[in-house]
Amino acid sequence: MSILLLIIVLAVLILAHEFGHFIVAKKAGIKVEEFGLGFPPRIWGWKYGETTYSFNWIPFGGFVKILGENPDEEQKTEITSDSRSFQNKPRSIQALVLAAGVTFNVLLAWLLLVVGLSIGLPSSIANAPAGYTVSNPQLLITDTLAKSPAALAGLKSGMIILYVERDGVSRINQPDAKSLREFIGTSVGQTLTLGIKGDFKDESSGDALKQFKEIKVKPITGLVSDQAAIGISMDTIGILKLPFSLAFVEAAKLTLALIVNIALALKGILVGIFMGQTTVLSSVAGPVGLVTIVGSSFALGFPYLLNLVAVISINLAVINVLPFPALDGGRLLVLLIETIGRRPLNSRLVNAVNTVGFVLLIILMILVTYKDIARLVTS
C-alpha cells in the first residue's frame, strides 16, 4: 500500500512539474514533441496532435521534450530555422518555460495546503491565526540531539509525548513544551518515565506491533544553558481548520515559510557535503525512505499526507532551482550567461556538462537509496 501511495505521490509531483514546462511552452508557441512520465526506455506511448505522451521504465522522474531545447539535435535535423523552436524564442520566453516547472510545484504545494487548512491541517499552536485555535493538541518531538539521553533512550522526531512521570509520584498528563521543559529542568539525575505514542517494533520479530511505549530517560546538565535537559526539541501540534477564504492567505504564508526553511536546510546539507561531512546524508530520504514516510503520514490521516506532499513538492522546487547541470536552475544559469555574453555557449559543451550533472544526480540517488536500505536493516 505504501509503495502504491508513493508511486501516486511521485506521479502527481512529476506531472505538476512537467505540465508547467508543457503548458507554458505551448502558450508561447513552442512545439512540444514528447511529454514523458519516467525516463526512457519507453514502455508505451501515444500521439495526440503533435505531441507524444509516454510512460517509461525508469520511474523516478519525467521530462518534456521541447523542439530546439537541445541545440545539437537541432543541427542534426536541420530545423534550426523553425520559428516554433525553443532556441528561436526570446530569452525571456525561454526563461519562463524553464522556470515553469518549479513554479507549478510551488503552486501545487500552495493548493494542497489550501485544501488541507480547509478540512483541517496539522499545525503548531504558535502559528494559528489570531482568533483561531487548534483542536486535539499534542506535544510532538520535532528533533533529537545526537548522543543525548533522549537519543540513547530511543526518542525520535515525530513521536508524541502523552505524559511524564517521576518516581511514580509526580506526573503531568498531556504536557505542553513549557511545563515539560520545567519538569525536566528540576529532575537532574532522576529517572523520568515518558509515555510515548509512535511506531514501535517488536524486538524479536521486527514487526511494528504497537503504538505506545514507556521510555525511561535521565536528564543531564550541559546540553542547554542553566538547566537539565534530555536533548529534544518540542512543539505542540494540533489540527487547524480555517474558512476557505482565509485558507488561501494562510496557505500562501505557510508556503513561503516552507520555501525559506527548506532552502536553509538544503544549504546546510550542501555545505556539509562540501566540507566532507558525509553524515549529513543521513537526514536525506530517497525513494525507499519515502515509502515509509508516505505510509506513516497516510496512517495518521489524509491531512497529514496532504501536508507531506506539499512539503515534498516544495523540496523538488527548491532543489530544481539550484544552478546545477541538468536541473532547471542550471539551464537558467546557462541562459543568464548567454544573455550577458550576448551569444550562445558551445552547445556540445553545454550538453556534455548536463550529461555529467545527470550522471552525478543518479549516483547521488543510488547512494541515498543505499543509506535508506541500510537504515531499514539496522533499525
Image: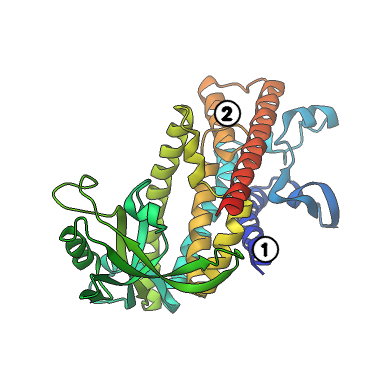
Q: Which of 179 and 195 is in front in this view?
A: 195
Q: Mark 2 points at which residue?
A: 334
Task: Please report the residue visible at 78 percent of the width from the left and 31 percent of the height from the top.
Answer: 74
Q: Name the residue under label 1.
A: 3
148 in relation to 12, above or below: above
Q: Residues within 10 Å of mark 2 (few under 14, many from 20)?
A: some
Q: Which of marks 1 and 2 is nearer the N terminus?
A: 1
Callout 2 amino acid:
Val
Callout 1 amino acid:
Ile
Q: Where is residue 344 in the image (x, y as percent from the top left)?
A: 63, 23
Residue 174 showing in the rendered view: yes
Task: Please report the residue visible at 80 percent of the width from the left and 51 percent of the height from the top.
Answer: 57
* Callout 2 secondary element: helix
* Callout 1 secondary element: helix
Rounded to the nearest angstrom, the CA distance separating label 1 from label 2 is 37 Å
Q: Which mark is residue 52?
A: none
Q: Nearer the viewer, residue 362 or 346?
A: 362
